[in-house]
Image: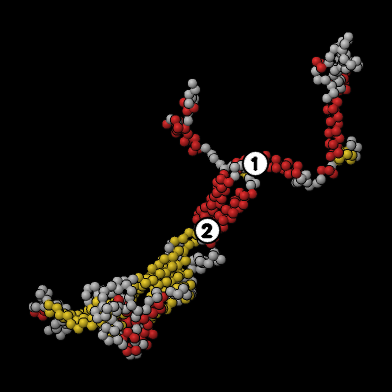
Amino acid sequence: AVPPLGFREGRETRGTMGLWAGIKFIVKETITYKTVKLVKTYDKTLILLHLFFMTLITTYAFYSIVVSHSYMKFETPITSVTQSLYRNDFDDLAGNAASTLPYCVGTGNDLVDYVSVANDTYKDPQCVRLDASEFTQKDANALWVNTHFRQRTVTRTCPGKDGTEFKACTETVANVRDAFIAGPEHLALDLSFTVTATFGLAQPPAELIIRKPDGSTVTHSPGSKNDAARLTIGDILSSAGIDLDAESPTAIGKGSVFAAKRAPHRLMGVHLRVKLETTNTNPDPWKPFDTTLRTFVSVEFVPTKEMFGPATHVYYVGGHLDFDDNLPSLQSHDQVRVERDWSGVYIEYESGGEVGKVDLITTMMAITNAFVLIGMATAIVDNIGQLISARFYDDKYEDDGEREILENIASQLEEPGHLGVPFDPKNLRLMSDDDVPGMNYEDAMYNIMNQIREIEDRLSMIPEEEGEFVEAEGGGPSRQPDGYPPLYLVEEISAEKRMKALEEEEEEPEP
């Protein structure tokens, strides 16, 4: 019986490979150099498929490198904002009567009818004119512009001499009033932007593009001097699609009189996020090498459920008199204070986008990825070729020098045009000893072939073996049956052989 192949002496299958043999196999496979063999096929279907996939992948690779700027190294920049209030237009309106403002002419619950989650009732607000410094609060990267406040007066009375004992104090709340601020949307901001990145970028954007809700844009060019862009609070609100007198769709609570609550943005407050997307690549695919620094400004409304405003502001207005200098005593705990709970427009700035610079390593990686993608076209066509063509491997041949020689021979046989030869070989002629041109090479070869053919015909008449000679009737083995003269097999003695025998002083050979 013959043992199975995996158990024959001196042979092992990969499945029965021992540990040491397995290690040697892995090492051998690791250090073995492998390369791709270049092959060709002339199958028209596969050629068209390859061209199709090559076109798609090459187009994608070109788009990825050039249009998508894969040769650049990107990072998220920091766009800092410098903001200052411009009050002139707001101050010019200060002398106008508040009754001309639509949100100042209602009474009772006409404009506001709202009960908050904390069960605070808001109705019939007043309209007041305040200085801009009273209702604005500017931070490093944000701004409050308040539109409504609730004011109350709190009187605190404490026992002891001059009210200095802090324990057992009593507080009395009086004069609770609600008020809208007249015309806060006319206050303007002067905004300057500076874009910085770790690779040394620190400059204002060449173009500041403000996007509107309807898709339109407004472009401002700060220039080298970083001229500020002036926007009113109303402009910023309209960029987010917000009307202060419109109903807040996200406010929770209820109405105190009417079935439907009346809680406008002017009462509830508005949270706005100004997004600053900075880039130095042009989104237009037909301008891939435009590196103008642009900052796109868009304003986003952030929904809020309850009244949105800064912390309560407290104003202390005095206490018991100090008997020595008739000034309010700082030691006294008897105080009268005014508290204002604000709600209004909160503007915060969010920096984003991508800026980049040309980077050698990034470019090399992008080109390498492009070549890998282009190589995928061959792999895809190979898989398709195996599915649609039963002769795929027969039609696929190695592209080496031998194949090229065979192709040239085949082309010469099909069309003997002497490709690659700078003259016609028919014009070549044999030269005699006297350098006289004679027969051309083609005719000479034809004559030689004819002579060889005649010699072959004559040689074919000579018997090849002595056994073909038969003994004639009544004669010796040299007689043929039909009585023809005898035919001898002789060795032809050439003139060269005779001359050699004479030179060596030998007898002349006989045939």
Mark 2 or mark 1: name the one nearer the start of the chain: 2
Indicate the amino acid at tag 1. Answer: Asp
Between the C-alphas of marks 2 and 1, the distance is 34 Å
Along the line of sight, which residue is nearer the eye, 83 or 426? 426
Q: Give the residue drawn at x 67%, y 41%.
A: 403
Residue 321 x %, y %: 14, 83
Residue 458 x %, y %: 86, 26
From the viewer's perspective, is residue 350 above or below residue 125?
Answer: above
Asked if residue 49 shows in the view, the reply is yes
Indicate the amino acid at tag 2. Answer: Ser
Name the side, left or right, on which 125 lies relative to 56: left
Along the line of sight, which residue is nearer the eye, 370 or 328? 370
Name the side, left or right, on which 44 lies relative to 155: right
Q: Give the residue drawn at x 62%, y 52%.
A: 48
Q: Which mark is residue 123?
A: none
Q: Which residue is mark 1?
A: 400
Under tag 2, what secondary structure? helix
Mark 2–mark 1 contact, CB under 8 Å?
no
Q: How busy is the neighbourhood of tag 1: few (under 14 within 10 Å), some, or many (20 plus)?
A: few
Q: Which mark is residue 64?
A: 2
The image quadrant of residue 33 is top right
**How are the residues colored?**
secondary structure
Q: Give the residue drawn at x 27%, y 78%.
A: 259
The extreme top residue here reads 474
Q: Give the residue drawn at x 83%, y 20%.
A: 463
Under tag 1, what secondary structure? loop
Name the side, left or right, on which 298 lies relative to 71: left
Quick one: quadrant of the C terminus? top right
Residue 158 x %, y %: 11, 78
Asked if residue 145 shows in the view, the reply is no
Q: How busy is the neighbourhood of tag 2: few (under 14 within 10 Å), some, or many (20 plus)?
A: some
